[in-house]
Amino acid sequence: MTTDTLPSAPRPPGSPGLPGLGETLAFAKDPFAFVQERRVRYGRVFRTNLLGRSTAVLIGPEPFEAFYDPQNIVRDGSNPQSVQTLFGGAGVINNLDGAAHAMRKQSVSAALSRDAIETYLPVMTRFVDAAFARWTDAGEIGWNDELKRLVIETLGAVFASIEPGPDLVALVKRCELIAAAFTALPIPLPGTSYTKGVRAKDEALAYYRALVRAHRDASYDDGLARLLAAPSANGTAIGDAEAAGELNHLFLAGFIVFA
């Protein structure tokens, strides 16, 4: 989380790093090692400077207790602009506050409710069983590539009824490029990891918008269908562009966490 606390407010231990860059290079090199090393040095809460922004890092459930109260959370502007761009822009749930966030959460929760997940389980089990059978027959596999494939295949099936094939292969590659851009320096020049990630995000959003249109025109039983059908507090359903943005957010979150 980033914060614009007053200079007189107490701050957690940590380091601002180099002028301008802060500790961005160390974080980009290995985010997990970066966090682990500073956890040992400073504890579960520490401050740093990433992408030119003062940042507080909170580890584990205890430091987050204050943020269980929605009144203590401000999402708009909390992510660096480059990160929010990769997530799909300002209209995605992780950048919304107040009534706008509550309305979007109602739509997104329809795709992630307990009842919805129970309907996904047979499909998820089928993909996991198929993956283990494939790995057993192969003898030797590349775990990283195989796990990425399994995550996107499973998410694609349960969220948008995407069948295995070229579309899924392309989607895995796009997710890889976008995920790599999260920890790259946000330099918008040709050939940089960040530029490749932004291009992949644009291609992914175009693909998701096509999926949304297909779901508007036909009957599906998946997460996207539930998201589109869920009425918000004012009785309106989510728009096509917003639904595509939330798909991008869901796929990226699942890819980053599980792959």
Image: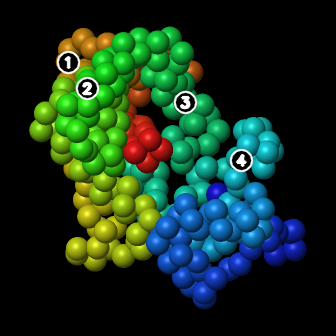
Q: Position of residue 161 (x, y in %)?
A: 25, 22
Comes first in the chain, label 3 or label 2: 3
Tell me which numbered mark, 3 or 1, is placed earlier along the sequence. Answer: 3
Please name the residue that numbered disc 4 is placed on. Answer: 60
159 over 143 or under it: above or below: above
Residue 132 appears left or right of 46: left
Q: Look at the numbered discs 4 and 1 and tell me whether their residues touch, using CB distance below 8 Å.
A: no
Counting from the top left corner in percent of width and height, residue 141 is at 25, 44
Q: Nearer the viewer, mark 4 or mark 1?
A: 4
Q: Nearer the viewer, mark 3 or mark 2?
A: 2
- In front of the other: label 3 or label 4? 4
Q: CA distance from mark 3 to mark 1?
A: 24 Å
Q: According to the image, label 3 marks what residue?
A: 105
Left or right, 56 with reference to 111: right
Secondary structure, mark 4, is: loop
Residue 133 badge: 2
Res 50 seen here: yes
Please state which amino acid type lies under the numbered disc 3.
Lys
Q: Residue 228 at x, y = what percent?
A: 37, 22
Which label number is shown at residue 217?
1
Image quadrant of residue 192?
bottom left
